[in-house]
Image: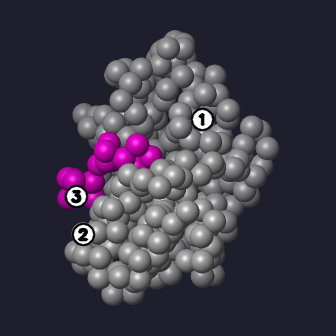
Amino acid sequence: MDRPTFSVIIPTFNRARYLTEALDSIFIQGVPDVQVIVIDDGSTDDTEAVVTGYGNNVQYVRQENQGVAAARNTGLDLATGRFISFLDSDDVWLPGKMKAELYIFGSDPSADAIISDSERWLENELVCPSWFAEQGLVVPEHKPAPLASIPPLWVKRKIFATCCLTITAAALERLDQLRFDISFETHQCWDFAIRMIHSCNVIVLPDLTAIVRRFDDGTRVGRPLPGTPYPPAVKRVMAYRRYRLFEKAQRMRGWPVDVIPHIDAARSEAAREFAANMSGWRRPDLARIVLMELRRGAVGSAVAVMASGLAPARLRSLF
């Protein structure tokens, strides 16, 4: 059997009302030989009926609810295409995405992955016309360029949406550890991106290829909608998870020398934000962060974290 050109992995949970638009945005690309895999992560709505309507054009797999990272990994295990793309069930691709990626892969055999730009919508209102611009990513001459040639903004923030990532199967086979880390409750895509950037030649396509959509549909458990204020407790949790993310990145060998200081700074910043959003006098996980900062020689960061985390709120501004 011939190998598909693309495999598209769609994890979904109770988003049957949006899934049709996501699937249709794949089929209007006009690229033949596409394997579309929908991983139903334990939905209780009519997701299966929606997928069944596409017949053999879509492969449907249902699993017990394990989270989006596990669902994507299931899709990776089933993908047989030469290129692997990801699309969330509430997002849509713009026409021409796949053909633009095929052109880049065909013209640059060294390319392992391609990332591209997207706009973000919240409850049918445009809130960000360019993800790249919001993150400060500027591609010289607005032409495809290696990510390694651009300042490492990806360290401090996730610079692309997962629906704007396509990676070669050859790269995934070469890097068999490149799966989504299910130990992260959030930030799995950012962690995946950092490990991919560490080991792959990533090309930036500075074109809008997708629309990232967010709805208040009850599926974003424990995470406020984008654009809404995060309470201190959520800020603390998110900062701790970012700290773990950068701690993991620091253990990876072979970073370019100009990237290492950015990872160090991002880790220290996450530690300070964690401590700044503590409440009360006892601080779970605070001692661990202080110890880890001391072990890596970041004494100033350790002192700032300890002072901020242990001081009463009225004194924190002094540190």
Which quadrant of the view contains residue 132? bottom right
Residues packed near mark 3 inside 10 Å, few (<14), some (14 to 19) or many (20 plus): some
Of pointers 3 and 1, the one earlier in the residue sequence: 1
Q: Distance between the residues labelled 3 and 1?
A: 29 Å
Residue at 39% in and 87% down: 258
Q: Quadrant of the C terminus?
A: bottom right
Which quadrant of the view contains residue 291? bottom left
Vertical order, 222 against 82 (above or below):
above
- SS of the residue at dot 3? loop
Mark 1 belongs to which amino acid? Asp
Mark 2 belongs to which amino acid? Arg
Q: How far apart are marks 3 and 2 (CA)?
A: 17 Å
Residue at 54% in and 13% down: 46
Q: Which of 290 and 83 is in front in this view?
A: 290
Circle 3 residue: 175
Circle 1 residue: 90
Find the magenta span and give its range: 170-193
Of pointers 2 and 1, the one earlier in the residue sequence: 1
Circle 2 residue: 251
Which quadrant of the view contains residue 192? bottom left
Residues packed near mark 2 inside 10 Å, few (<14), some (14 to 19) or many (20 plus): few
- SS of the residue at dot 2? loop
Of pointers 3 and 2, the one earlier in the residue sequence: 3
Describe residue 318's horizontal placement relative to residue 254 as left or right. right
Q: Where is residue 164 in the image (x, y as percent from the top left)?
A: 52, 53
- SS of the residue at dot 1? loop
Q: Position of residue 145 (x, y in %)?
A: 50, 76
